[in-house]
Image: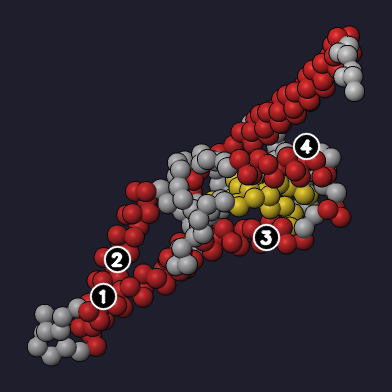
Amino acid sequence: MLMKRTNIEEKLLRLKKKEKTENDILSQVKKILNENDAADTRILETIQNSNNYTDSNDFEFDLLKTKNIFHIDQIKTICINYRLRFLDTKYFKGELPYEAISKIKQLEKDHNTELKGFKIIAPSKLFKLENADDPLLFAPIGNGYYYLVHKWGNDLSPFRKLLMWPYKSFSNLIMTTLFVSLIATALFPEGIFSNKPNSAQAGMIFFFMFKAIAAMVLYYGFAAGKNFNTAIWDSKYFNA
């Protein structure tokens, strides 16, 4: 059987077609990568830019996950209970994970819109320096509702709510000071002022303990520029 002769023209046409296909693939991949880079840059600029404020986004309601929708009153309660802040992302100084950007891009694709007005729940320190606690990224829906886009980092300490309870309000601080004063009075050695301890002596010791502890609390509060949880949860000022 005779072998078919090689047609150089045909080989050239096949090679040309193959190279064109490869170039088309490379061009499409390059275009996709460029579009992704452009989208990443735009999202980062939106997150970091102070001129992109909005209180609503054009979400497709049927595509939203109910578990990710929160009202501002719910967010405020959590921030007050755990001494967290709810601020625009332009104040956030921590590292934003790429997974958050990916989720934003997916949401924009699903809802055919560009999201703006992002906010973050995080401890105060995360708005000044990096920390390991857990920020939550939100996008506004409208009418006081926000959509949870992404959460990252570690969970808060289970004792944080208890530890931050005294800072929740002035009445909480007074009650805590009274409680600590009672413990300090109970631990105070008997017989220091008299061989026969009585209620009047205990009352005097409690009074001085309360004054001393209250003075330290007030000094620390004023010196550090601290304020109560109800006042700082949405404050952009560092010394609030």
The quarter of the image holding the N terminus is top right
Q: In the picture shown, does residue 106 fall above or below 62?
A: above
Report, in whole angstroms, how far the alpha carbon at label 3 lies from the one at label 4: 26 Å
Earlier sequence position, callout 1 versus callout 4: 4
Helix, strand or loop under label 1: helix
Task: Please identify the quarter of the rendering in which residue 97 is found.
Answer: top right
> Which residue position holds label 4?
114
Q: Residues within 10 Å of mark 2 (few under 14, many from 20)?
A: some
Q: Is residue 92 visible to us here?
A: yes
> Which of the two marks, 1 or 3, is nearer to us in this view?
3
Q: Residues within 10 Å of mark 3 (few under 14, many from 20)?
A: few
Earlier sequence position, callout 2 versus callout 1: 1
Q: Do the residues labelled 2 and 1 touch (CB within 8 Å)?
A: yes
Q: What residue type is labelled 3?
A: Asp
> Which residue position holds label 2?
213
Say which residue appears at 64% left-offset and 50% top-offset.
150
Say which residue appears at 77% left-offset and 61% top-offset.
66
Q: Are marks 1 and 3 in contact (CB under 8 Å)?
A: no
Earlier sequence position, callout 2 versus callout 4: 4
> Which residue position holds label 3?
73
Outermost residue, left side = 195
Q: Which amino acid does label 1 sit on?
A: Ala
Q: In the picture shown, does residue 68 fall above or below 189?
A: above
Q: Is residue 232 visible to us here?
A: no
Q: Residues within 10 Å of mark 4 (few under 14, many from 20)?
A: some
Report, in whole angstroms, how far the alpha carbon at label 2 lies from the one at label 4: 53 Å
Helix, strand or loop under label 4: loop
Helix, strand or loop under label 3: helix
Q: What residue type is labelled 2?
A: Ile
Report, in whole angstroms, how far the alpha carbon at label 2 lies from the one at label 1: 9 Å
Residue 184 disc label: 1
Say which residue appears at 32% left-offset and 54% top-offset.
219
